């Protein structure tokens, strides 16, 4: 079986570090697949108006989708996944609906709230008007970004004056802004591959710089060796009681099924307050799949090596595609007798 690894190839605007990061992930996935007997090729997506990658995709038996955008712009990820859906070729990861909704935090939060999933109260702003019905402190972040883009040490504010200033700064760079009540407490990640839940990880903020809020900033996630990176340490499996684990899995699964249909792979981020109530912060379809990332860490705690994780993701994609084909055959009109 031939698996095409699709990735963001818009490298003209990137520095060497960005290129190396993407290419390293491509190589890791290809190595894992080849080690299990798959034939692989790598296919870059280089520009929004360049569809030269489509014929190559259609010659593959399946696609491992690592394309998180085009030229580093995450808004294009939605269109890449939607295009893959139209090819009919089995592909890994979540469907276009899940990816599109998750990129719009205010939409995702509205859907989750209406389904009864516990989330912190929020409002969406496209101007500098201060909302009157949120309890301080709050966290201010772009409504349509992921990977902690736009989140730094100043994202949590404790006064209306600070909120007004932060909102003005954020709106200037990102038109639509989410303001959400800050949940003081422990932070956890729960990973899923299809309907399989992986061991829970906790982000421990014990060594954050003095005066910093215990949140996962852009620097903590991407600036290796920075004080915020060193101060936010993932621990998997998390040291929690069976009762808390059960409560978190119930909430995380509800969010995962509501937004992603329990298909593909992803991660649900939660905070648990002092009363033990879990709140969903975000649902992240198609998170970083590199061997050093959180989903791989959870998989290893579950007993899967990296190769196992990659191949199970491919198996889920193939199974999902087979189920759809079988369903389509059942409802297809019978051919007229010749």
Image: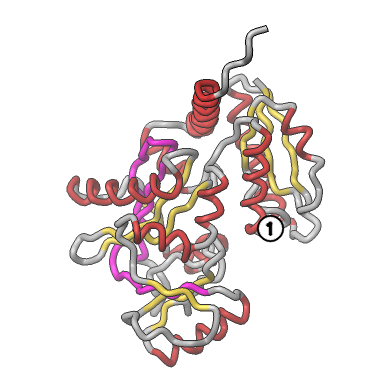
Label 1 environment density (alpha carbons within 10 Å; few <14, some 14–19, many ≥20): some
Q: Secondary structure at mark 1?
A: loop
Image quadrant occupied by the C terminus = top right
Q: Quick check: 173 above or below 295?
A: below
- Compared across the picture, whether 132 is left or right of 278 comes to right
Task: Give the residue displayed 63% in from the left and 45% down from the top.
Answer: 82
| Residue placed furthest toward the top | 338
| Magenta stretch in the rendered image | 177-205
In depth, the one of 47 and 8 nearer the eye is 47
Residue 298, magenta (yes or no): no
Residue 179, magenta (yes or no): yes
The residue singled out by tag 1 in the image is 72
Image quadrant occupied by the N terminus = top right
- Compared across the picture, whether 215 is left or right of 240 comes to right
Residue 329 x, y percent position in the rendering: 54, 21
| Residue placed furthest toward the front | 337
Residue 113 x, y percent position in the rendering: 35, 61
In depth, the one of 263 and 276 nearer the eye is 263
Question: In the rendered view, how is the structure colored?
Answer: secondary structure
Task: Give the residue displayed 50% in from the left and 48% down from the top.
Answer: 285
Residue 227 x, y percent position in the rendering: 49, 69
Q: Main secondary structure of the magenta part?
A: strand
- Compared across the picture, whether 327 is left or right of 62 comes to left
Residue 308 x, y percent position in the rendering: 48, 29
Can residue 122 be seen? yes
Task: Give the residue displayed 76% in from the left and 37% down from the top.
Answer: 54
Can residue 307 be seen? no
Q: Quick check: 93 above or below 143?
A: above
């Amino acid at each position: 079986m031939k698996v095409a690894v699709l990735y963001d190839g818009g490298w003209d605007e990137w520095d060497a570090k960005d290129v190396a990061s993407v290419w390293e992930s491509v190589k890791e996935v290809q190595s894992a697949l080849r080690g299990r007997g798959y034939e692989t090729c790598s296919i870059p997506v280089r520009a929004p108006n360049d569809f030269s990658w489509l014929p190559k995709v259609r010659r593959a038996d399946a696609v491992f989708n690592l394309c998180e955008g085009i030229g580093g712009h995450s808004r294009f990820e939605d269109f890449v996944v939607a295009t893959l859906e139209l090819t009919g070729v089995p592909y890994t990861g979540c469907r276009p609906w899940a990816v599109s909704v998750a990129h719009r935090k205010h939409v995702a939060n509205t859907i989750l709230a209406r389904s009864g999933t516990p989330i912190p109260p929020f409002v969406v702003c496209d101007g500098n008007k201060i909302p009157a019905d949120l309890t301080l402190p709050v966290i201010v972040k772009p409504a349509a970004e992921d990977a902690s883009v736009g989140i730094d040490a100043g994202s949590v504010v404790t006064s209306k004056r600070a909120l007004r200033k932060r909102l003005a700064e954020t709106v200037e760079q990102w038109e639509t802004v989410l303001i959400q009540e800050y949940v003081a407490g422990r932070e956890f990640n729960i990973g899923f591959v299809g309907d399989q839940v992986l061991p829970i990880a906790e982000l421990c903020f014990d060594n954050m710089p003095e005066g910093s809020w215990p949140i996962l900033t852009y620097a903590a996630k991407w600036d290796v060796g920075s004080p915020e990176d060193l101060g936010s340490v993932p621990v998997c499996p998390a040291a929690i009681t069976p009762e808390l684990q059960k409560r978190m899995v119930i909430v995380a699964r509800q969010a995962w099924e509501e937004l992603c249909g329990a298909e593909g792979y992803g991660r649900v981020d939660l905070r648990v307050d002092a009363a033990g109530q879990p709140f969903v912060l975000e649902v992240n379809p198609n998170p970083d799949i590199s061997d050093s990332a959180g989903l791989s860490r959870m998989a290893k705690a579950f007993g899967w090596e990296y190769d196992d994780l990659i191949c199970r993701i491919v198996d889920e994609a193939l199974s999902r595609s087979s189920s759809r084909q079988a369903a389509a055959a059942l409802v297809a009109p019978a051919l007229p007798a010749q």
